[in-house]
Amino acid sequence: MGTVTPFPLQGRAPSQIGFERLELTRILDLYGRMVAAGHWRDYAIEFSRDAAVFAAFRRATERPEIRIEKRPDLRNKQGMWALVNEQGMVLKRGHELGPVLAPVERRLMKLIED
């Protein structure tokens, strides 16, 4: 028979961090627009105990061009959202996802104009 996984109890830390449906929808919408503009071609999602990471690639063989990280432990400090570039530098950090994605969305507008 199958294994039954117990429902997590209130107050206990989750075994892994994940994206909520609205967050993932917003991220995948941006990804789709960047693919349509011909800039991104692949993505990866990683769920760990500390963070959920969405990485977007120009080519699958390269390092990710950007990473969108959700780290709930930083919620009360710097904000749980971070936009990280290819070299690992934090480009934007915040409490809300929209303003963190703004630099990528602005770049998308420039890509479409050219």
Image (spheres, rainbow, N blue to C red):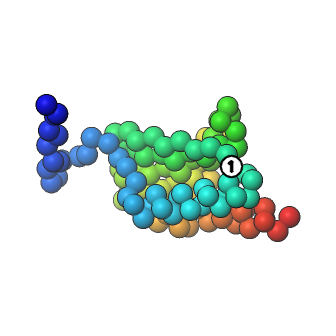
Q: In the image, is residue 50 above or below residue 77? A: above
Task: Answer with the quarter of the image where residue 48 lies.
Answer: top left
Relative horizontal placement of residue 56, taking residue 37 as reference (left or right): left
Residue plotted at (68% across, 49% down): 40
* Viewer-proximal residue among 114 and 98: 114
Q: Position of residue 94 (x, y in %)?
A: 50, 61
Which residue is the extreme one toward the right?
A: 114
Q: In the image, is residue 59 above or below residue 80? A: above
Relative horizontal placement of residue 97, taking residue 90 as reference (left or right): left
Residue plotted at (42% across, 64% down): 22
Residue 70 in sight in this render: yes
Residue plotted at (53% across, 58% down): 27
Residue plotted at (44% across, 51% down): 70
Query: Crowdedness of circle 1 by 10 Å Cα count: few (<14), some, many (20+)?
Result: some
Q: Quadrant of the N terminus?
A: top left
Relative horizontal placement of residue 64, taking residue 109 as reference (left or right): left
Which residue is the extreme one toward the front?
A: 1
Which residue lies under the disc numbered 1?
A: 40
Task: Answer with the quarter of the image where residue 112 lies.
Answer: bottom right
Q: Quadrant of the C terminus?
A: bottom right
* Viewer-proximal residue among 90 and 104: 104
Residue 93 in sight in this render: no
Q: How many marks?
A: 1
Q: Secondary structure at mark 1?
A: loop
Q: Position of residue 92 (x, y in %)?
A: 58, 57
Amino acid type, callout 1: Trp
